[in-house]
Amino acid sequence: MSTLRPEWDSDDWEVAKKAVVMITDEAELTRAAKEAEHWKVRNAAVEKLTDQNVLAFIAKNDYNCNVRNAAVKNLTGQTVLSDIAKNDSEDFVRGTAVIKITDQNVLADVAKNDNDKYVRDAAVRLLTDQNVLADIAKNDDFENVRKTAAGKVTDQNVLADIAKNDEHWSVRLAAVEKVTDQNVLAGIVKNDNIGCIRKAAVRNLTVQSVLTDLAKNGHDSEIRNAATENLTAQSVLADIAKNDVNMHIRKTAADKLNDTALAREIYVDIAKNTGNADLCIAAIEKLTDQSVLAEIAEKSLIGHIRMAAAERLTDQNFVQWVYFDVAKNDIDRNVRIAAVQKLTGQNAQADIAKNSNEREVSIAALKRMTDRDALTGIAKNHAEFEVRIAAVGMLSDQNVLADIAKNDNDRHVREATVLKLTDQNVLADIAKNDNDGHVREAAVI
């Protein structure tokens, strides 16, 4: 009788696991799944098993929770899954079983009684019984479980109760988002102390008289704005658009106006006078009046507002002047770079590349240049060595490159230029005579 141990029983678990991967015989897999010493070897065998009886045995009896969990993943029998969901000692194994269960009674039992909040939550996600969901939504100890249940409840009375009374804001919010009773919603807007809940209630309001009162008289600007979003009465919207002290709310009202002339008047006022750049740009995007846009593009002190206005202008000469002015003078480097990307004229790009006091802006401009003479001038004469290197990268004239490689006063520029040279005589000269070892080495390579 042979006493040879199977390879899956090797003392080296990695060797044993590789052997399991090669097994195709179910009986041999079963032996490995039950008898292998290292849990990772048993786990590898379990992952390949299909025999439901063997999987059920391992899922209930293996001492290692990871192996049991692997077995549960391959199980299909509802009875054994229910047993594991209720009785396994490890919450993540119970959770794996729960998500495979279809029996609503078992899910209800787990959702109400499991001692782990995440297992309960997993069960709640699969529940459909409204009575059980209502009970859990009101009574579970953990707010996330209550929130999950509230999100599945359909009974408006239950939702109203939760929306008004749950101690945790996230549960109240989940309920409010499903409430349709206008009186309940109005009460929540007035009484809840959490802003996002009041806003959610406002979003579900449809009664125009209530919305009008909130939009005009609410103390919270976000609530007023949310109420305005749901208004339909044009006279009320016009009043708010003209008279509200908050520019954002005025724009919200203007967006809903049928009176395009009044809406335009509001957008112009906002674009010219708001201190909020994002709101200003949003208003600009509603405008087509070229004189207004030109005024903003010329006079605004904020570069990206000027550019937003310029993008809506039809006079391309003026547009390019705006971009050039922003690229030269704006205080924000990123805005200047963005303006450079909009420039089309080579002279303008060259001007920025030569004269900007920001290296990144100069490089952004020269990368858009095609004028070889202008690039050569920058490569030879710019005060910043990084800009000269960027310009060298765009040159191909070997005579110009040889001149720079021999004569630039910065070794970084000479080294970068040497890498573009092809003339072996020039390279040999530099390799012998440059005063910097890095440059000489680059020439040799």
Image (spheres, rainbow, N blue to C red):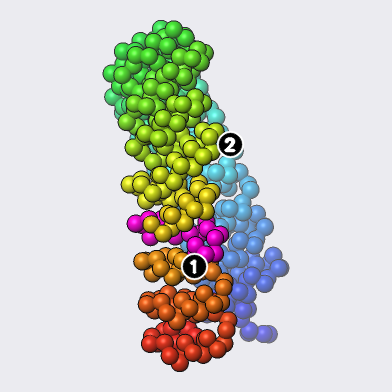
- Along the viewing direction, whichever of 327 and 143 lies nearer the viewer: 327
- Asked whether, in this view, residue 27 is left or right of residue 171, the answer is right
Q: Residue 76 carries which label?
A: none
Which residue lies at the image location 28% right of the left edge and 18% below the top edge? Answer: 219
Whole-Å distance between the Cαs marked 1 and 2? Answer: 78 Å
Q: Is residue 403 above or below residue 127?
A: below
Quadrant of the rendered image containing residue 439: bottom left
- Report helix, strand or loop for mark 2: loop
Can the viewer see residue 204? no
Q: Give the range drawn in magenta.
A: 356-375
Please name the predominant secondary structure of the magenta segment in the image: helix
Q: Position of residue 120 (x, y in %)?
A: 45, 40
**Is residue 370 in the magenta section?**
yes
Q: Kindly identify which residue carries mark 2.
A: 103
- Along the viewing direction, whichever of 77 and 179 lies nearer the viewer: 179
Which residue lies at the image location 34% right of the left edge and 28% below the top edge? Answer: 274
Q: Is residue 163 above or below residue 234?
A: below
Q: How crowded is mark 2: few (under 14 residues within 10 Å), some or many (20 or more)?
A: some
Q: Kindly identify which residue carries mark 1.
A: 376
Quadrant of the rendered image containing residue 252: top left
Q: Position of residue 102 (x, y in %)?
A: 59, 38
Type of residue at label 2? Asp
- Report helix, strand or loop for mark 1: helix
Q: Residues within 10 Å of mark 1 (few under 14, many from 20)?
A: many
Q: Position of residue 71 (x, y in %)?
A: 57, 56
Q: Position of residue 421 (x, y in %)?
A: 54, 79
Which residue lies at the image location 41% right of the left edge and 77% below the top edge? Answer: 408
Type of residue at label 1? Thr
Q: In this view, does 33 lie above or below 350?
A: below
